[in-house]
Amino acid sequence: IHARHSSMGNLATYASGYQASSGVKLLLVMVGLPARGKSFISRKLSRYLNWLGYKCKVFNLGSYRRQNLGSNHSHEWFRADNVEAMKARQQMAEAALDDVLEWYGKENGSIAIFDGTNSTSDRRQLIIQKLQDAETDDL
């Protein structure tokens, strides 16, 4: 979770005081190696949060890739030294972040789950920078 202040203290205390009606938006960024359960956890968490009454949505980067670029990619496409693929993956991440911001505004979303590996510090910095550029001080 990236909050406006990174020194949130105890996350459980912060999360337990969260109210969807407060207007505060949360972005949960999943981080981890492929096939380790990020998407499974994202879907289960979203379902639970929606059941509790929060407006929650999963933004899965794999879905963006499959919709925009197809699903027939070899393992070479995911290599860090594949510059073209790296640019395409970056574009998919930016498109997903744009959709998150649009969902916050147009659909009054409360909790977005950004589901992808997000394993590099560059990717995580992109997420932070994109949110700062959008001037979303309440994230």
Image (tube, rainbow, N blue to C red):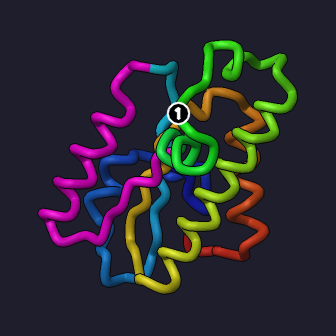
Q: Residue at x 74, y 49 (%)?
A: 91
| Residue 48 falls inside the magenta stretch | yes
Q: Element at badge 1? A: loop
The residue identified by callout 1 is 71
Name which quarter of the figure residue 51 lies in.
Answer: bottom left
Please state, as top left, top right, bottom left or bottom right, where the C terminus lies in the image: bottom right
x, y (%) of residue 55? 30, 71
Compared with 68, 71 (above or below) is above
* Residue drawn 26% across the image and 59% down it: 16
**Depth check, front residue: 59 or 67:** 67
- In the shown orientation, is residue 102 left or right of residue 9? right
Please tell me whether residue 85 is drawn above or below residue 95 in the rendered image.
above
Q: Residues within 10 Å of mark 1 (few under 14, many from 20)?
A: few
Q: Amino acid at mark 1?
A: Ser
Residues shaded magenta: 35-60
Residue 135 located left or right of residue 119: right
Give the vertical position of 139 relative to 43 (above or below): below
Front in this rendered view, residue 72 or 131: 72
The residue positioned 25% from the left and 70% from the top of the image is 54
Q: Position of residue 28 (x, y in %)?
A: 46, 50
Residue 28 sits inside the magenta stretch: no
Q: Measuring 50% from the left and 25% from the top, which residue is drawn there?
A: 32
